[in-house]
């Protein structure tokens, strides 16, 4: 059996989304997946053409906005052919923002739908720093991705 590969890309200001990314990385490693973790602003979406599994982990800003530093990444995703990719989307926001809570995740989901990639499970919204129950949800997301990519 060949080893599966994954990339986890995240955006963060205060560290919560890197903590979410780290949990995903840890679960992937435990499943025997070869994984790289990168800041979205330091990576190109084309890199996703070289892996089996991707996880996108952005924070949400100003009334449901994407982080400024990921706008290029986001735009470049559009219409890329990622038909061999399975992916999951997770991220930390703050439920104080109610109707705007974690909206960056929904925006990424919409953009990923233009690429032909296959989402494996529901978006995982994390309120601020990931708690134990979030870790359980993230483990489920990773399991679903690994299963789908096999
Ligand atoms: C000015 C400002 C605006 C924000 N707007 C939103 C928002 O619209 N929706 C949301 O879910 N979270 C919002 N947040 C909360 C952050 O997304 C949340 O604190 C998140 O955990 C930050 O992630 P990070 O620690 O990885 O930077 C906002 C935070 C700040 C400081």
Image (cartoon, rainbow, N blue to C red):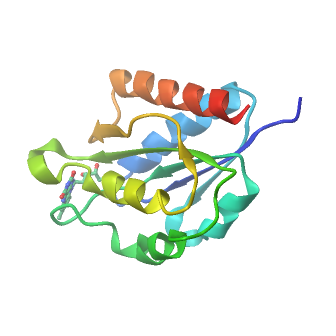
Image side of residue 133 versus residue 111, left or right? left
Q: Residue at x 49, y 63 (%)?
A: 114
**Residue 12 in sight in this render:** no
Q: Residue 21, image x and y in percent?
A: 50, 44
Q: Position of residue 72 (x, y in %)?
A: 47, 78
**Depth check: 44 or 13 in front?**
44
Residue 74 relative to residue 128: left or right:
right
Residue at the location (66% across, 59% down)? 48
Residue at figure coordinates x 49%, y 24% from the top left: 140
Q: Quadrant of ligand 1?
A: bottom left
- The image shows residue 12, relative to residue 68, as above or below, that is above
Q: Quadrant of residue 131?
A: top left
The foreground one among 90 and 119 is: 119
Q: Is residue 115 above or below residue 149?
A: below
Whether residue 70 can be seen here: yes
> x%, y% of residue 85?
65, 49
Q: Nearer the viewer, residue 123 or 115?
A: 115
Identify which residue is drawn at 35% across, 52% down. Answer: 105
Count of numbered circles on the image:
0
42 to 146, vertically: above or below: below
Q: Quadrant of the C terminus?
A: top right
Residue at the right extreme, as displayed = 1
- List x then y, in percent, for residue 110: 38, 58
Which is more toward the observer, 12 or 66?
66
The quadrant of the rendering that contains the N terminus is top right
Image height of 40 relative to 75, above or below? above
From the viewer's perspective, tell me whether residue 36 is left or right of residue 137: right
């Amino acid at each position: 059996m060949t080893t599966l590969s994954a990339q986890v890309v995240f955006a963060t200001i205060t560290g919560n989304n890197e903590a979410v990314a780290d949990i995903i990385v840890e679960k992937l490693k435990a499943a025997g997946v070869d994984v790289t973790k990168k800041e979205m602003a330091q990576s190109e979406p084309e890199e996703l053409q070289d892996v089996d599994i991707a996880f996108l982990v952005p924070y949400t800003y100003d009334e449901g906005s994407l982080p400024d530093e990921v706008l290029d990444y986001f735009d470049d995703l559009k219409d890329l052919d990622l038909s061999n990719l399975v992916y999951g989307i997770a991220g930390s926001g703050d439920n104080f923002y109610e109707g705007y809570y974690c909206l960056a995740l929904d925006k990424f989901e919409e953009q990923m739908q233009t690429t032909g990639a296959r989402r494996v499970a529901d978006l995982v919204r994390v309120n601020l720093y990931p708690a134990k129950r979030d870790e359980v949800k993230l483990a489920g997301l990773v399991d679903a991705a690994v299963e789908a990519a096999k």
